[in-house]
Amino acid sequence: MNILEKELTQENILEYGMAVGQFSEFLKNNLSTHPNLLIPSRGALPFYKAAKVGTQLCSMYGVSKNSFPKHNTIIVPFTADYVKSEFGDEISSCIRDYWVSVYQGLVDGKENISTQFYRFILKNIVGLDSKIHQANLFKKPIESDYLPKLEIGSGTLFIDTVISGRASSEILNSMKRRDVDIKPFLIVDEGGKKLKPEYGVRELVEELGGEIITVPRIFTEDRSPAFTGATSLVFPDLMIEASKLSQFKDLGVKFPGAGVWFNPPIKNFKHDYLEDVMSEFSKYPLMHVSSSVESLLNYSFLSIMGLDTKNSLQTAMNFRDEIINRDNTYEFDNIDMTLKEYSLSLKLLRLKPSNVGVSSSHVLRGYFLDSQITQFVRDFQTFIK
């Protein structure tokens, strides 16, 4: 019996479905006053997708007439992947504070150095097109995919998955310092056994008027992009070079982050944009697994909501069996497999790294030549003058 088979039990799947339901209620109860939704982690993304699609299905099948109020969802890559610096263990809080300052600039409607740096990465490394394209699943990404229009000056809901509590604590404390109106919904792994009191997460959530729940196992946490449906890519060398810019320190940012998410996975690009790369993607079965995971979560939620409970649960378990069978063959948690498949995504970047690595939590790391880094930061300085 492999790890996934142990974790994807019927009990855990139903508990996951209950958590999706609780998050769905949280959204419906709070989006009218906090119309912006911030997703900072790959682990939280499946909960949001399942809540959104599951609620739509419940409405379609007549189980519930409720639907989400109008809202604006933004995914920001708060990944604080390891990079050597003089800040030591404090580096993760510094990087997460940078991403908070990015979001602060977006939700306040006031461009700052952090927001500008993120936009510059999206344009010059990812190669985003600012033009509006007809909606199409297979499309080249545009700026609004990454930087959707937010309700300026309004409150923000925040969903995150939690193990020890360190990441959420660092983000929420930074939000408080920067006066961002935030209301969190935290999903704690393993029933809260690994939640460390010194991070004060429960107290923070209570102070901010949010909610905190526990589940036996967040089986989508720190797994392959095949499982979460999102590819996380960071640029460690670029962070180090950019940290020398005095403008970040003027904003109170000690160390900037540099990274992007791809969601949906990068395979969903316009075919005529990269036919040669698409042909390579088709050889790799992991790229198609996240849809099965999403379906499992959707039907688990529907089962909790009472939609033909027996059949919905059985459908969820069928998807579970499909995922496990694929895992036995392709090893989702094998980081070498993640590197092999998802480093293909870097072929789509405008500025291509010279080398690629992967962390134990399946975060891709792109490394540029020194000359590329120097030129990029020099161009950015010219851009902000």
Image (cartoon, helix red, strand yellow):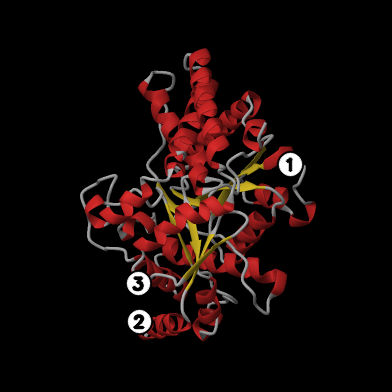
The span from disc 3 to disc 1 (Cα, nearest Å) is: 41 Å
Residue 212 pos. (x, y %): 65, 41
Question: What mark, if any, has residue 30 been given in the picture?
Answer: none
Quarter of the view holding residue 283: top left
Mark 1 or mark 2: whose residue is earlier in sequence: 1
Residue underneath mark 2:
383
Residue underneath mark 1:
192
The answer to whether residue 189 shows anywhere in this view is: yes
Which of label 3 and label 2 is nearer to you?
A: 3
Q: Secondary structure at mark 1?
A: helix
Q: Along the line of sight, which residue is nearer the eye, 320 or 175? A: 320
Give me the residue at 54% from left, 28% from top.
Answer: 320
> Mark 3–mark 2 contact, CB under 8 Å?
no
Quadrant where the image shows the C terminus: bottom left
Tally of numbered tags: 3
Residue underneath mark 3:
124
Which of label 3 and label 1 is nearer to you?
A: 3
- Callout 2, which amino acid? Phe
Residue 182 pos. (x, y %): 55, 53
The span from disc 3 to disc 2 (Cα, nearest Å) is: 11 Å
Label 2: how many Cα within 10 Å (few below 14, some 14–19, many 20+): few
The span from disc 1 to disc 2 (Cα, nearest Å) is: 46 Å
- Callout 3, which amino acid? Asn
Mark 3 or mark 2: whose residue is earlier in sequence: 3
Quadrant where the image shows the N terminus: top right
- Callout 1, which amino acid? Gly
